[in-house]
Image (cartoon, grey):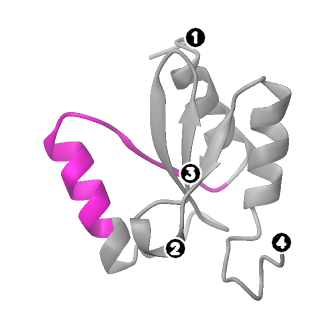
Amino acid sequence: MSYIKNKRDLFEPRCYELWDGCGLPHIQLTKDQGADNILIGRRCAIVEVKNSNKYKLTPAEKKMKRIIEEAGGIYWIVFDDDTALAVADYVREIAD
């Protein structure tokens, strides 16, 4: 996939590499769904991938974040190896 042409975040391939290394399946969402991926383990996580910690959420992302947080969930925003591995630990229930 051409990440620049399709406006996917350039950090996404690295996330997939890390999550695949943890044995975690992930489902890529379409751009208007309010997040980039669903990460699946003992728990599921809705994940938005950004290229740095200086990010802005789109209106669809803000809506998804609000819905998830109002329901008591976590809208994960990952932008580096540490945050990508933190969500991996969460879905594997390694740490809360």
Image coords of residue 86 (percent x, y)? 60, 31
Q: CA distance from mark 3 to mark 1?
A: 20 Å
Which tag, 1 or 2, sits closer to the chain's start?
A: 2
Which tag, 1 or 4, sits closer to the chain's start?
A: 4
Which tag, 3 or 1, sits closer to the chain's start?
A: 3
Q: Residue furthest top?
A: 94
Residue occupied by mark 3: 37
Residue occupied by mark 1: 94
- Side of 69 where 33 appears, left or right: right
Q: Residues within 10 Å of mark 2 (few under 14, many from 20)?
A: few
Instruction: Determine whether 57 is above or below 82 in the image.
Output: below
Which tag, 3 or 2, sits closer to the chain's start?
A: 2
**Which amino acid, by three-letter code, is at mark 1?**
Ile
Q: In the image, what residue occupies the spot 78% across and 23% down?
A: 23
Q: Nearer the viewer, mark 3 or mark 1?
A: 3
**Which amino acid, by three-letter code, is at mark 3?**
Asn
Quarter of the image with the N terminus in it: bottom right
Residue occupied by mark 2: 31
Indicate the secondary structure of the residue bearing disc 2.
helix
